[in-house]
Amino acid sequence: MSTSTSTPQNPLKAIRRVVTTHDEQGQAKVWMDEEVDNKSPPGFSDGVSFGLAWVTDSSPADCQTTVDGKDLPIGELSSEKGSVVRYVDMPPKHVSPMHRTISLDYGFVIFGELELVLPDGSRTLCKQGDVVVQRGTDHQWVNASETEWARMVYVLLPAKPVVIDGKELPAKSIH
């Protein structure tokens, strides 16, 4: 978590979500077409923001629900029962806390570059177009750029806890 005192202005284009459904005759139609609301999580003052595009509360998902997925409850970052689709915008010099979710996460870099940092200190540079498959491991994200923002989209799916030597590895909060 960065301790910067001024919040930089996010220059990235607003995220648009288009959600489809069916009409009464079974024809496909657009149900929602709107911008995703980006919010800074509590405790972060450097401009990092999260945008929640969709959540499901079961697997397999109910594609006939009339509930807007962004309104479904989740845990801190993931859902124990269904999927989460989230965008994260990270300002220059942002360093996330080391954290772990009990989920299988697909993280796509869609703008900028980020370093994936593991507890052993190893760093892997992830560039636009790369995907990181996060399988319940401790990790943090670093935007090492002095000037460029970065954006990732994550698809988080429920997973069994990782068990090492008979002990479950717990989730670790970003706060």
Image: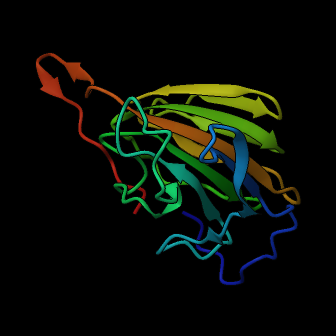
Tell me if residue 175 comes above or below residue 44 in the rendering: above
Of all residues, the one furthest to the bottom in this rendering is: 6
> Residue at the spot x=21%, y=19% of the render?
164
> Residue at the spot x=39%, y=41% of the render?
100
Give the percent coordinates (x, y) of residue 18. Answer: 73, 51
Can residue 170 be seen here? Answer: yes
Q: Is residue 159 left or right of residue 89?
A: left
Give the quadrant of the N terminus.
Answer: bottom right
- Snapshot quadrant of residue 91: bottom right
> Residue at the spot x=62%, y=60% of the render?
51
Tell me if residue 118 comes above or below residue 94 in the rendering: above
- Snapshot quadrant of residue 158: top left
Tell me if residue 27 comes above or below residue 16 in the rendering: above
Give the percent coordinates (x, y) of residue 131. Answer: 68, 26
> Residue at the spot x=33%, y=48% of the render?
172
Q: Nearer the viewer, residue 19 or 52?
A: 19
Q: Nearer the viewer, residue 163 or 154?
A: 154
Give the percent coordinates (x, y) of residue 42. Answer: 47, 74
- Snapshot quadrant of residue 34: bottom right
Of all residues, the one furthest to the left in this rendering is: 166
Q: Is residue 114 left or right of residue 95?
A: right
Q: Is residue 75 left or right of residue 32?
A: left
Can residue 143 be seen here? Answer: no
Of all residues, the one furthest to the top in this rendering is: 165
Give the quadrant of the C terminus.
Answer: bottom left
The colour scheme used to paint the residues is rainbow
Q: Nearer the viewer, residue 133 or 63?
A: 63
